[in-house]
Image (cartoon, helix red, strand yellow):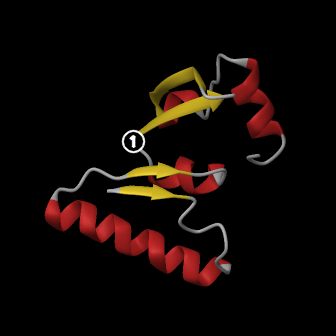
Amino acid sequence: LVCDEITSALDPETAARVLDLLDELRRTLGLTVVMVTHDLAAAASRADQVVVLDEGRVVEAGRADRVLVNPRHAVTRGLLAHGGG
């Protein structure tokens, strides 16, 4: 399932409900979810893997806990420093 900025126009409560529903679908149906987002908090709390793009190019990829806690690329560090995009 590909979700492109699925929560960007939603209030925080509705966004959380949508993300909870995605988690439930992933668990119960075994779906793979690809979520395009600027919301690094959502990525940090729900993603297994993260891919960071800059102008359409992959600049960093790996386990979310590694990429978002110990970023190796300046673009990733910049996104984290500015709250996500």
- Which of these two is toward me, 44 or 4? 4
- Identity of the residue furthest to the front in this view: 56
Q: Position of residue 80 (x, y in %)?
A: 74, 38
Q: Where is residue 69 in the image (x, y as percent from the top left)?
A: 62, 32
Quadrant the N terminus occupies: bottom left
Where 48 sits versus 58, above or below? Answer: below
Q: Which residue is drawn at 39% across and 41% down?
A: 48
- Which of these two is toward me, 73 or 69? 73
Side of 46 relative to 7 (left or right)? left
For label 1, count other residues whose C-alpha is less than 10 Å away and answer few (under 14), some (14-19) or many (20+).
few
Residue 62 occupies quadrant: top left
**Residue that mark 1 sits on:** 48
Q: Where is residue 29 in the image (x, y as percent from the top left)?
A: 15, 64
Side of 22 relative to 42 (left or right)? left
Q: How many labels does the image show?
A: 1
- Identity of the residue furthest to the top in this view: 72
Q: What amino acid type is highlighted by mark number 1? A: Asp
Disc 1, SS: loop
Where 12 sits versus 73, above or below? Answer: below
Where 18 sits versus 41, above or below? Answer: below
- Identity of the residue furthest to the left in this view: 29
Q: Position of residue 79 (x, y in %)?
A: 76, 37
Side of 2 relative to 60 (left or right)? left
Residue 74 occupies quadrant: top right
